[in-house]
Amino acid sequence: MYQQEIKKINVKNDPREAKYLDEWVMKYRLLGMKGRCADYIPALGESNLSDLGVYIISSDGGEIKSGDWEIPFTLQSISKVISFIAACLGRGISYVLERVDVEPTGDAFNSIVRLEMHTPGKPFNPMINAGAITVASLQYGESPEQKLESIYAIIEKMVGKRPTVNEKVFQSEWKTANRNRALAYYLKENGFLESGVEEALEVYLKQCSIEVNTKDIARIGLILSQNGYDPIRKRQVFPKEIAKLIKGLMLTCGMYNASGKFAAFVGIPAKSGVSGGIMASVPARYPQELPCQMGCGIGIYGPAIDEHGNSIAGVELLKHLAKVWDFNSF
Ligand code: DON
């Protein structure tokens, strides 16, 4: 049934696309009631379980949005994508990859187990906390402020506005970050941190607490889908080589220990955060007449998360979009 409908709806901003999306958002938001918010960070425990919003931006600037797309939320682990890009820009790809690997773990995002199992304790990838804390420490700059500036600058270039940190969320994380502190001390012991433990944690937890909405992350997803080129502002924001590398990491590690299933059933580079955000990047697909045929960025917010830390409603909505609009790389 959808196949016939799809043929008719590849027109920019066709109101029918929005209508379908509204129906799907209404359906999938109910799934949120089964989950829970990331209350291990106390300030995130206050979110509304049935919120669900989505924003899609296509390469020609067409936009479709639905539901609670305007609600601000914190980047959390989605920031790991941005901070990896910033570190590669500031230090060069090979410098970064000497300090963090690019292998999926199949473990939870905050797991400590592999650091000790493999000598010399090099973090497996920049999408798990151990890797992201390492990347935070090696950002260009001496102080946490300067290192954060590298991250803010690339966000500002992509999103068009200066990012702000949600202080309440940052404080909430800072006070409860015992596991992250343990990871950071272990990394420090093995020589992987290029700053003090507290400095690396400050950068990491502040980047996690940057406030965005679905439109902001959809724009970043779009730039990734175009290999670092911003088709709206018509400029290369970062090199293609970095875009390809981070998309490979998003596909293999972006949804934590559910990355394999997500790659199999959705099949696009995506990154989730425990606040319920998902940033996804859809490549151009040929030779079909489909919405966003030349690629798009997707931003999703649905704060009820599953045991892996991924938005329950968001993942199901993306699975559905992969099926009906062929939002799939393969
Ligand atoms: O370090 C933490 O626990 C959080 N600031 C970020 C974790 C996160 O988003 C993992 N997600 N799915």
Image: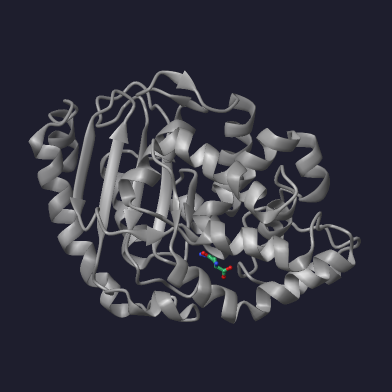
Q: Quadrant of the N terminus?
A: top left
Residue 310 is situated, as x and y percent measured from the top left of the image, at: 44, 65
Q: Quadrant of residue 159?
A: top left
The residue shown at (70%, 36%) is 90
Question: Where does ligand 1 appear, by image quarter?
Answer: bottom right
Position of residue 118 relative to residue 65, above or below, is below
Colouring mode (rainbow / by chain / secondary structure / one colour): one colour
In this rendering, position of residue 216 left or right of residue 201: left
| Front residue of this view, candidates 237 and 315 | 237
Position of residue 115 relative to residue 247, above or below, is below
Residue 278 is situated, as x and y percent measured from the top left of the image, at: 41, 54
In this rendering, position of residue 51 left or right of residue 326: left
- Asked if residue 81 can be seen in this view, the reply is yes
Residue at the outermost top position:
234
The residue shown at (44%, 72%) is 168
Residue 40 is situated, as x and y percent measured from the top left of the image, at: 50, 81
| Front residue of this view, candidates 186 and 264 | 186
* Count of numbered circles on the image: 0
- Asked if residue 329 can be seen in this view, the reply is no
The residue shown at (46%, 43%) is 268
Residue 8 is situated, as x and y percent measured from the top left of the image, at: 12, 29
| Front residue of this view, candidates 325 and 26 | 26
In this rendering, position of residue 6 left or right of residue 139: left
Position of residue 117 relative to residue 218, above or below, is below
The residue shown at (35%, 72%) is 304
